[in-house]
Image (cartoon, rainbow, N blue to C red):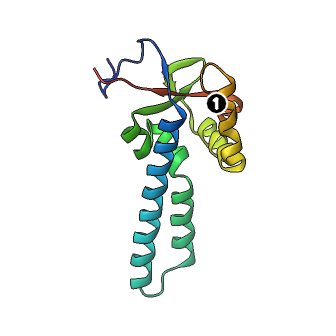
Amino acid sequence: MTPDNINYNAEINYASVLDRIKSTTIDTITIVGIIYLLSEILNDMNNTSDTLRIILFIAIVMYEPIFITLNGTFGNYRSNIRIRKNNDTTKKLNFFQSLFRFVLKFSLGWLSLIFILLNNKGRALHDIFSGSVVIALEEE
């Protein structure tokens, strides 16, 4: 059993389009909230350096790649889905796979989701190119 009490060795259930959209929506709301909070804090501070603003911007942009590498974003947890390696769903993506997946996902947008309907694992175009798959978890 894994630390988050999920059995990854059971039959693999692939995430639905609805679960993926739900997860992305939760993450988008989370990121917008963080941006708003940081902008309010930075506006209240006097003489905030450009370097700090750049670091915070990069941290916000890297939210998805970093958290997918760690185990999943807030939206992934709330939607009970995880992004894993296609060839072994017990393994997480490394940072570079996750970053590549994110860049493709962002670049291709909704077009990428059309491919979910065209394959039996429900993999979007960005999943296919990055070697990932989105699985739905069942709590035990």
In the picture shown, does residue 131 fall above or below 38? above
Q: Is residue 27 left or right of residue 122?
A: left
Q: Position of residue 130 (x, y in %)?
A: 67, 32
Q: Residues within 10 Å of mark 1 (few under 14, many from 20)?
A: some
Q: Is residue 29 above or below residue 66?
A: below
The quarter of the displayed image where residue 78 is located:
top left
x and y percentages locating residue 62 in the rendered image: 55, 52
Please name the amino acid that badge 1 sits on. Answer: Ile
Q: Residue placed at 40% from the left, 46% from the top?
A: 74
> Relative to 45, is 109 on the left or the right?
right
Give the labeled residue for mark 1. 116
Quarter of the rendering occupied by the C terminus: top left
The residue that appears at 43% across and 44% down in the rendered structure is 75
Q: Secondary structure at mark 1?
A: helix
Work out whether residue 120 or residue 32 is closer to the camera in this orientation and state it.
120
Rendered location of residue 122, percent (x, y): 60, 26
